Amino acid sequence: MALYVQKFGGSSVADAECMQRVAQRVYDTQQAGHRVVVVLSAMGKTTDNLINLSKQVNPQPDEREMDMLLATGEQVSVAILAMALHAMGAEAVSMTGPQAGIATDSAHTKAKIMGINPERVIENLDKGRIVIVCGFQGLAPSMDVATLGRGGSDTTAVALAAALKADRCQIFTDVDGVYTADPRTVSEARKLPVIAYDEMLELASLGAKVLQSRSVEFAKKYGVELEVLTSFDRIPGTIVKEEVDDMEQIVVRGVAADKNQAKVTIQRVPDQPGVAARLFQELAAANVNVDMIVQNVSEHGITDISFTVPRDEVNRTRSTVDKLLESLGAAGATYDVDIAKISIVGVGMRSHSGVAYRMFEALSNNKINVEMISTSEIKISVVIRSAYADQAVQVLHKAFELDQANA
Ligand code: ASP
Ligand code: MG
């Protein structure tokens, strides 16, 4: 008898029919002789709709009240699933995050899970019940409900799996696994049977929106093996787990495009100690997430500094940078939103050489110009014109033979 945590996202519980499909799946797992804890998201677009509703009465809603509001979405889901299970003759009980013993810090709308007391969940499992828990919420020290940030139900599922020492944490969604590239861009993209936590983290932050990054970090920290799979079909998904030796045989596991970046260039700044420190200190203070940074070769003591930021932070960046230009002694600044960041990721890069060369060669053979480069141990990213983003992903997917089953 194994203990399963099964999490279903909003699209998997969007309506009554979906709920029945989920109920059947969950019940089958229990009937196969397992203990089952279910974590649910709000139905369909409920969370978005609640946010819109709040904005209609107050452009800047209080965060405690926002959590009161958003937490209702998941509460609807768990009660409806419990009812669907009862109708099938199953024993099931629903719980809010606080009832399930999930304690958070007090950062409303972006709270972190501080601990879980799973006693009540275990008591109910011991009685033969399926336990259905609201994702995305817990109890703050003030005894108020707090939510974990968008997509937070994944984190609830992983945290519960860790606290309960579950044998498996399955994340059901509307895609059937993690792919070598976005299948909408690359028709030969393949579903990966397995991927390392670190690779998944890189791909998640690159915009492969399969799992919330925080949930993967949590899973890595507590050694919880995840499986990402679809709730619409009964087929195996992708396992996300600790890296094992033979995973390094594959150099590149996936290619991703991030089209939500912008490039900022500060022109003609004096090449002196303290300039970069000052600039990036001010940007950090303005809460701008700087990603890649490149400083050009200087000529006559003057240089250009370029960096990338998320596109929706361009305005904040502009107001910070424009104020600084004069005191930095810079000639001006440009803001370019027509870029894309293309990355290749794989733990095999640690033990293989020549990966960067193959990447640049493939791009240049297709006349795609590289404007910026950054690397880490398991990732190489380049900035290119956004118009070439899809083509670059296709070219790299082919160059690294990701369409081959053993690649
Ligand atoms: N319902 C929340 C959201 O839409 C949490 C989740 O789906 O994981 O962000
Ligand atoms: Mg959701």
Image (cartoon, rainbow, N blue to C red):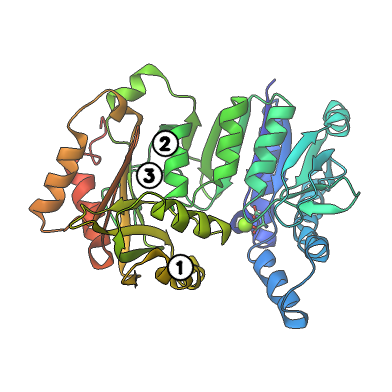
Work out which residue is located at the far left of the displayed protein and give it: 365
Q: Position of residue 236 (x, y in %)?
A: 47, 36
Give the left or right position of residue 102, taking residue 366 as reference: right
Image coordinates for residue 298, horizontal then vertical, percent: 21, 54
Q: Position of residue 328 (x, y in %)?
A: 40, 64
Query: Which SS class for mark 2?
Result: helix
Residue located beneath label 1 in the image: 324
Q: Which of the image's four quarters has the N terminus?
A: top right
Quickly name the residue at label 3: 179
Q: Which quarter of the rendered picture does the C terminus lie within?
A: top left
- Amino acid under disc 2: Glu
- Note whether 404 is above or below 42 in the view shown: above
- Residue tagged 2: 199
Residue at position x 70%, y 70% from top?
51
Q: Which mark is residue 136?
A: none
Labels 1 & 3 near each other (Cβ < 8 A):
no
Q: Quadrant of ligand 2?
A: bottom right
Residue 318 image point, x, y percent? 45, 71
First in sequence, mark 1 or 3: give its number.
Answer: 3
Tell which residue pokes out farthest to the top in this image.
245
Q: Amino acid at mark 3?
A: Tyr
